[in-house]
Amino acid sequence: MTGWRAVRADLVRRLTAREWRARETLPPETALAAHYGVARGTVNRALQSLAEDGVVERRRRAGTIVAARPVRHAKLRVPLVREMVEATGARYGWQLSRLSRADGAVRVRGAHLADGAAFLLEDRSINLAVVPSAATADFARESPNAFLVATVPVSRGTLNLFAGGATAAEAATFGVAPGTALLRGERETFLDGALVTRVRLVHRPGHTLTLEL
């Protein structure tokens, strides 16, 4: 392997495979240089690039540590639903309703809860080519939102927001009449040009979305 970009790409692959988890320390630069068969300066440049992207944190004497919530350049910060719920003073919960694996992807459906009531419905597909660790993740215990925020840095994304009438199933979940206007979102996120995940979100009635500019 030659060049810091190649080293960086492989480190990202290993990070998304959860070879090292959040807050764990990566091997020393000398060990990584020996592993990849490159100069220590090449590894240093790759790690510096990951640090600039918010994937890792570099600390004097402590080494290189996997960031708790990797964010590329702090330009795209995917919100953590748990924090949204707890900001309202409610107790957070997650309820898995469906899980399937096919065609190189994991599809997860479920509801984020606030004090036991539906707060946000999530229907998500995760690309296993980019996030192989999703194949064995315990989505009954951890929401895909929390899993991805803690695992995968993203370089860009798209978000579409629109209002739509509640389906019969959604109306029953939220306790409203069918056809009630609900805020919906469709989001895609990418890592270095590859699709990470595609998700459809349905917010509870009266939800206000706040964007930081």
Image (cartoon, rainbow, N blue to C red):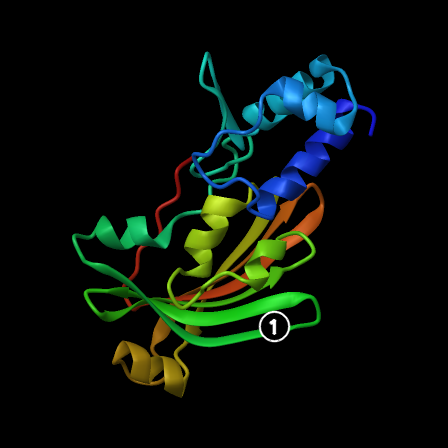
Residue 152: quarter of image: top right
Q: Secondary structure at mark 1?
A: strand
Instruction: Tell me how many marks there are.
Output: 1
Which residue is at 38% across, 85% downward? 169
* Residue 98 or residue 207, whichever sits in front: 98
* Residue 59 or residue 206, whichever sits in front: 59
Q: Is residue 60 above or below residue 121?
A: above
With 7 as the anchor, is 210 left or right in this view? left
| Rendering coords of residue 74 (x, y %) | 49, 32
**Label 1 is placed on what type of residue?**
Arg
Which residue is at 46% across, 45% downward? 150
Q: Identify the residue position indicated by label 1 in the image.
A: 101
| Rendering coords of residue 136 (x, y %) | 54, 62
* Residue 74 or residue 107, whichever sits in front: 107
With 46 as the anchor, is 24 left or right in this view? left
Which residue is at 63% across, 19% downward? 29
With 116 as the anchor, is 210 left or right in this view? right
In the rendered image, the quadrant that contains the N terminus is top right
In the rendered image, the quadrant that contains the C terminus is top left
| Rendering coords of residue 185 (x, y %) | 48, 61
Residue 179 can be seen, yes or no: no
